[in-house]
Image (tube, rainbow, N blue to C red):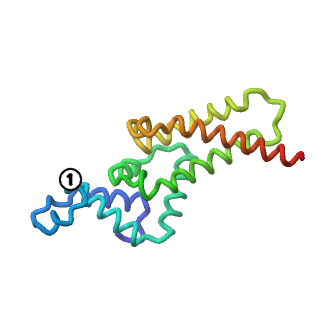
């Protein structure tokens, strides 16, 4: 992969390479199989090789990419590549969770800090999550994975925790 390529372009190249990989025709590859499915074995091997050889900068690049995409609420072509490579549940899971947590905490903090007279702030935060975070994450993960892993419930809990944390900070500032 050329270093001048953008991260989404690199993902597309990896996805295409994985799709084009020939069916194994030698016994060595079968003996080293990581899965009963040869294509899954290759995907695992590719992921392992990239994980071992990557620097922390790769995680930072993905974090920036997730943040930019979420903040603009854009559906991206590279979401499909990530699903095909199955990286969201493995090497990118901590990065995704960090971006979601930071984004929700920043929004809650900016929206409710110092505001005590406005009603329905918690409902407003839940609505913001439902309108901005949920569609983006559903697009990233795919509808089936979003439902199966109960991301809706997890995001609701996370926004409640952010809300409670901001209010606790304010209480301790008073004391």
Tell me residue 72's x, y (percent).
56, 46
Q: Residue furthest right?
A: 175
Tell me residue 21's x, y (percent).
20, 60
Would you place residue 171 above or below residue 62 in this image? above
| Residue 33, picture quadrant | bottom left
Q: Nearer the viewer, residue 142 or 5?
A: 142
Q: State the residue at coordinates (47%, 53%).
A: 93
Tell me residue 128's x, y (percent).
62, 35
Q: Nearer the viewer, residue 86 or 60?
A: 86
Tell me residue 102's x, y (percent).
63, 51
Would you place residue 86 above or below residue 30 in this image? above
Q: State the residue at coordinates (11%, 66%).
A: 27
Quarter of the N terminus within the rendering: bottom left
Give the number of marks: 1
Residue 119 left/right relative to 144:
right
Residue 98 left/right relative to 116:
left
Determine crowd level at label 1: few under 14, some 14-19, many 20+ residues with C-alpha closer than 10 A: few
Q: State the residue at coordinates (60%, 38%).
A: 157
| Residue 44, picture quadrant | bottom left
Q: Nearer the viewer, residue 135 or 144?
A: 144
Residue 76 left/right relative to 130:
left
Q: Secondary structure at mark 1?
A: loop
Q: State the residue at coordinates (20%, 66%).
A: 32
Q: Residue furthest top?
A: 119
Residue marked by disc 1: 37
């Amino acid at each position: 992969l050329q270093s001048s390529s953008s991260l989404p372009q690199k993902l597309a190249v990896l996805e295409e390479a994985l799709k084009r990989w020939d069916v194994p025709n030698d016994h060595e590859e079968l003996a080293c199989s990581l899965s009963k499915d040869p294509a899954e074995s290759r995907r695992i091997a590719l992921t392992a090789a990239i994980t071992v050889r990557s620097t922390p900068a790769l995680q930072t690049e993905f974090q920036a990419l997730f943040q930019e995409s979420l903040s603009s609420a854009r559906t991206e072509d590279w979401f499909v590549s990530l699903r095909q490579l199955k990286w969201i549940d493995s090497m990118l899971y901590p990065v995704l969770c960090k971006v979601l947590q930071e984004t929700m905490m920043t929004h809650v903090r900016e929206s409710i800090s110092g505001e005590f007279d406005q009603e329905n702030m918690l409902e407003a935060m839940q609505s913001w999550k439902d309108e901005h975070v949920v569609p983006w994450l559903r697009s990233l993960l795919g509808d089936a994975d979003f439902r199966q892993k109960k991301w809706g419930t997890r995001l609701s809990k996370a926004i409640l925790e952010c809300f409670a944390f901001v209010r606790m900070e304010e209480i301790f500032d008073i004391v």
